[in-house]
Amino acid sequence: MPSSDLSPTFISHAPGYWQPDEMDHWSDHKWQLRNRVDSLIDLESRLNLTDIERAGVLLAGTKLAMSITPHYFNLIDRDDPDCPIRRQVIPRIEEGWNAPEELADPCGEDSHMPVPGLVHRYPDRVLFLVTDRCASYCRYCTRSRVVSGVGEQHLETQWEPAFRYLEKHTEIRDVLLSGGDPLLFSDDRLDKVLTRLRSIPHIQFVRIGSRIPIFLPQRITPELCAMLKKHHPLFISIHTNHPRELTSEVRDALGRLADAGIPLGNQSVLLRGVNDSVEVQKALVHKLLMCRVRPYYLYQCDLINGSSHLRTSVAEGVAVIEGLRGHTTGYAIPQFVIDGPGGGGKIPINPNYLIESVPGRVTLRNFEGNVFEYPDPTPMPAAELERLHQQAFCPSEG
Ligand SMILES: *Cc1c(COP(=O)(O)O)cnc(C)c1O
């Protein structure tokens, strides 16, 4: 890995694979979207592909499309087939094999949809899938069954029935907009969706899940930030996996969101050959704090079809957390979770710091492996209570 990956510096990779005269359009997000790398010819004109990747691109056409913004493409190392950025967005032949434990809908979302597009899995909050398109496609996408529009299944969000469901279900206080990527909507369209949600009195909290700050930081315009700001309290969960993704353009985009008063969290996926080491994770979370982003979740990779080459063991995730907790800022440490297969929801997984728990005391270990006993409280004796009472109210008699 380039040594810069682990240093806490923010650099721009432009123009990279593009011509200097194309830089006139570089900061225009529409130009970035129009110029995405989305075909084998396009890809091979810029990179030397391996046969494993070439076959992967040909297979991807009917499963999950390939599409990479010029901004993100520039993070790819031309000569390193194991480049952590490459593994995230360039298909590989392994995607064509479904391991026996894998599923098309690993989190059981389709069976928790009271209205198409609305996943109501937890008592007080819903996941609202508002689009099936993203700026670029992650090869481990948990929603690849519907995302990108090339597979057999399609997302058909039922807008009016979804809003009516939200209005009727007064227990819903938290709506998470996702997809696809909601920040692909125009400012106007997103403003209308947020206004409609904000008109529902019991919805206290709205979040947007988006990888656009990473794939397409040019989309985070001052106008978008000014619009989002009208809808507070609004949080954004971004998705970044590797410190190289935090470029100077990304840092500036995140700064604009933070300046608009939007609390930012990050959701990472633990991926083999991308970020499955304490060193890479530490560099990532330190850069996130510098961008005013709080690491929120680290996901064990879902059992999505064709992802076995990107998944790690659960023990490796626990080892990452073990390597962070106590060794660095508490704010920098995400919660490691497994989304229970078939619809179990997010289940937190932690290193075991509780060695023993018996009535009267617990035995603990800290991050350095030292052992501590922590006793349960001793009830105050009645005689002591009486003595203190006397002392407070009848000091002369004491
Ligand atoms: C992740 C998720 C949420 C939000 O969970 P939090 O723990 O509140 O971030 C809500 N609904 C569904 C279906 C989810 O997968």
Image: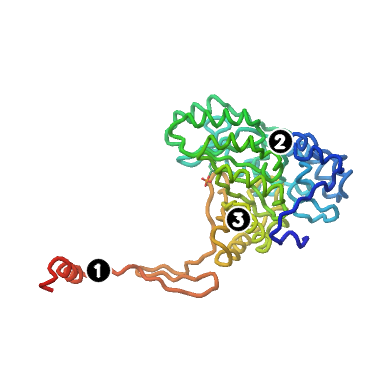
Instruction: State whether residue 275 is above or below residue 206.
Output: below
- Looking at marks 2 and 3 on the same chain, the residue that comes earlier in the sequence is marked by 2
Is residue 66 something that shows in the picture? no
Report the disc number at residue 37.
none
Question: Which sits in the foreground, 331 or 262?
Answer: 262
Q: Can you tell which quarter of the image residue 80 is in?
A: bottom right
Look at discs 2 and 1 and give the one toward the viewer: 1
Instruction: State whether residue 323 is above or below residue 64.
Output: below
Quadrant of picture, ligand 1: top right
The answer to whether mark 3 is within 8 Å of ligand 1 is no
Q: Which residue is mark 1?
A: 380
Image location of residue 187, percent across then percent down:
63, 31
Q: Which residue is mark 2?
A: 148
Tell me which amino acid carries mark 2: Ser
Which residue is at a point 56% across and 62% down the rendered structure image? 329
Which residue is at a point 59% across and 51% down the rendered structure image? 293
Local SS, label 2: loop
Asked if the residue under mark 3 is in contact with the one under mark 2, i.e. CB atoms within 8 Å, the reply is no
Q: Which residue is mark 3?
A: 289
Image location of residue 386, percent across then percent down:
16, 68
Local SS, label 1: loop
